[in-house]
Image: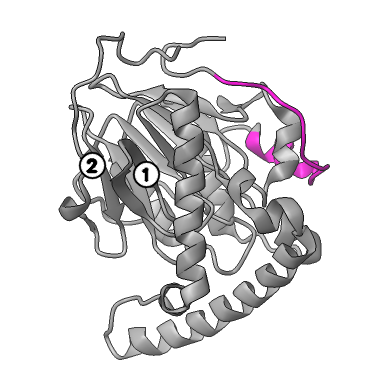
Amino acid sequence: MAWNSLSWRAGSGGGAGPAALAAKLSAPAGVQDGEGSEPRRPKLEVRSVWISDLHLGTPGCQAHALLDFLRSVDCQYLYLVGDIVDGWQLRRHWYWPQAHNDVVQKLLRKARKGTRVVFVPGNHDEFARKYLGHNFGGIEVVEDCIHVTADRRRLWITHGDYFDGVIQCAKWLAYVGDSAYEFTLRLNRHFNLLRARLGLPYWSLSKYLKLKVKRAVNFIGDFEQAVVREAKKRGVHGVVCGHIHHAELRDIDGIVYANDGDWVESLTALVEHPSGRLEIVDWSRREPLAAQAAPQRAVPEEASGVAA
């Protein structure tokens, strides 16, 4: 099936998830999303936005920063690249403050106002894979899809958990790691409360530890290579993913590898400018990381905005 901006492959998978999610996604517009509660900054006007790993339903989710970003950006296409709602954590302990509801309502509002919003489920919200091909309040649920940039590059969009050997071969170990990760995030929250009182900016302890541990660094490299190999098989110009909470935008073996990061540690998103140029935005710094602009290459003529 082809649309104006994307196509999808429907597939099977995913376990049952909270029935309330579907009701929440299709909730009426009357719920307050916090619009106008804070001073406005100049709008970031781009063609497309990719965000992932929000982990709504956990204390680690940076919902207020995410709302600030969503209020500040205007786009034609918005891709939710997995782990939007953390079903693993919600099964263990229900946690859903108003700010998380505001994020959902803001996404629905963008869909109502004409933004094409596409949700590609990840491993933490795998329950949504039961609803592939469905539409909830204007948000389309797909397994993966192709986005065609303004400069006619075809980007494959996938969360990335299918390329994580731990998730695929030893899921119990992933659950153990998730609990340890949540503990680190709790430490990080207390640490950053102290930094805030001292007038210091946000700093991610878990991100620092991950990049200092050799195995974690090797895992990131292996993950990137696996995703790029699959993108080559599919004959696309690049791939956009999430999953590993590590924002990156670079050329790997002739393929544009773009990881939009997360909204737990990094507060990052991937954006496409009207020209087709890709860029990582680090919202913890409130400015784009110009140094991470993607390489631009000429590609064959193709109708922009239409997926094959």
First reached walking from the N terminus: tag 1 or tag 2: 1
Give the crowd class for mark 2: few <14, some 14-19, many >=20 residues within 10 Å.
some
Residue 255 picture location, percent across and down = 34, 36
Mark count: 2
Residue 29 picture location, percent across and down = 56, 33
- Secondary structure, mark 1, is strand
Q: Residue at x 63, y 44 (%)?
A: 162
Instruction: State which quarter of the image contains the C terminus.
Output: top left
When the figure is inspected, residue 240 is found, relative to residue 214, above or below; the finding is above
Q: Is residue 19 left or right of residue 293?
A: right
Q: Does residue 10 show up magenta in the picture? A: yes
Q: Which residue is drawn at 37% across and 44% down?
A: 258
The residue at which mark 1 appears reads as 258
Tag 1–tag 2 contact (CB < 8 Å)? yes
Q: Does residue 43 show up magenta in the picture? A: no
User: Looking at the image, which is closer to me, 281 or 165?
Assistant: 165
Res 105 quadrant in image: top right
The residue at which mark 2 appears reads as 294
Span shown in magenta? 8-25
Instruction: State which quarter of the image contains the N terminus.
Output: top right
